Image (cartoon, rainbow, N blue to C red):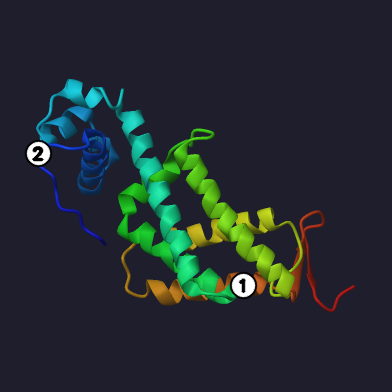
Amino acid sequence: MGSRKPKTRYHHGNLRAALIECGLELIERKGVHALTLREIGKQLGVSRSAAYRHFKDKAALLFAISEAGFIEFGNLVEAARKDAGDGFAAQMDAIALAYARFANERRAQFEVMFAAVLEPGGAAETAASRNLRILEEIIREAQKTGEVRQGDPVLLARVVWALVHSASMLRMDGDSSEAPFIRFSTEALRSGLSNQMQVSPAEGRVHTANQR
């Protein structure tokens, strides 16, 4: 898991960013229950009133940590897709691996991100929607080439997100076999999305491609 260099005092610059970073470090070391603005202010060497000028309470700070995480997370997912080049399989594998690495290396932030209630129209909600749109675009393109069965791309994107998220959560133990597991998971997922097998949400039945 990635490590962060502890900050003990704040000297100059962006205090809000320093509070977020220090809060995240504290969560990684001691858990969410240990997070207080008083403790963060003490570690940064600033008064509690200075911290409260940026965040009214612990919930506000946790929301800011979640927001920053979703923005960074979205950047990583988009970069993974671009680096993978063309092709549904390559892009799905790249995104899933980027997702799993973030979940494992930013364990505390990942947990805070998905525990927070996203403010409609806020930066965190926008970043989360951005990730869903990336998946939708990949699925739409794969539907055009016949790699993915026809159906609502928004619904299919949500299913993909749910399965990749679950696989990433299961591998949050730092096991070195993470990559093979994630690749196997996406392979199984791609098989389920292919034209060879179709599920009717209305009927709850599975149809193979040669069934009428």
- Pick the quarter of the image with the C terminus: bottom right
> For mark 2, what is the residue?
9
Disc 2 and disc 1: Cα gap in Å?
A: 49 Å
Q: Indicate left or right for 109 with 149 as reference.
A: left
The residue at 53%/75% (across/down) is: 90
Q: Residue 171 versus residue 76: which sits nearer the camera? A: 76
Number of labels in the image equals 2
Q: Secondary structure at mark 1?
A: helix
The part of the image, by quadrant, that contains residue 41 is: top left
Farthest residue, direction top: 49
Label 1: few (<14), some (14–19) or many (≥20) C-alpha neighbours in 10 Å? some
**Residue 68 visible to the viewer:** yes
The part of the image, by quadrant, that contains residue 180 is: bottom left
Q: Amino acid at mark 2?
A: Arg
Q: Indicate left or right for 94 with 155 as reference.
A: left
Label 2: few (<14), some (14–19) or many (≥20) C-alpha neighbours in 10 Å? some
Q: Indicate left or right for 67 with 9 as reference.
A: right
Q: Position of residue 25 (x, y in %)?
A: 22, 46
Q: Secondary structure at mark 2?
A: loop
Q: Position of residue 120 (x, y in %)?
A: 54, 33
Q: Indicate left or right for 93 with 212 as reference.
A: left
Q: Position of residue 99 (x, y in %)?
A: 44, 61
- Against 128, residue 200 (above or below) is below
The residue at 59%/54% (across/down) is: 133
> For mark 1, what is the residue?
190
Q: Position of residue 123 (x, y in %)?
A: 46, 39
**Residue 185 visible to the viewer:** no
Mark number, residue 125: none
Judge depth for marks 2 and 1 and give the one in front. 2
Q: Amino acid at mark 1?
A: Arg
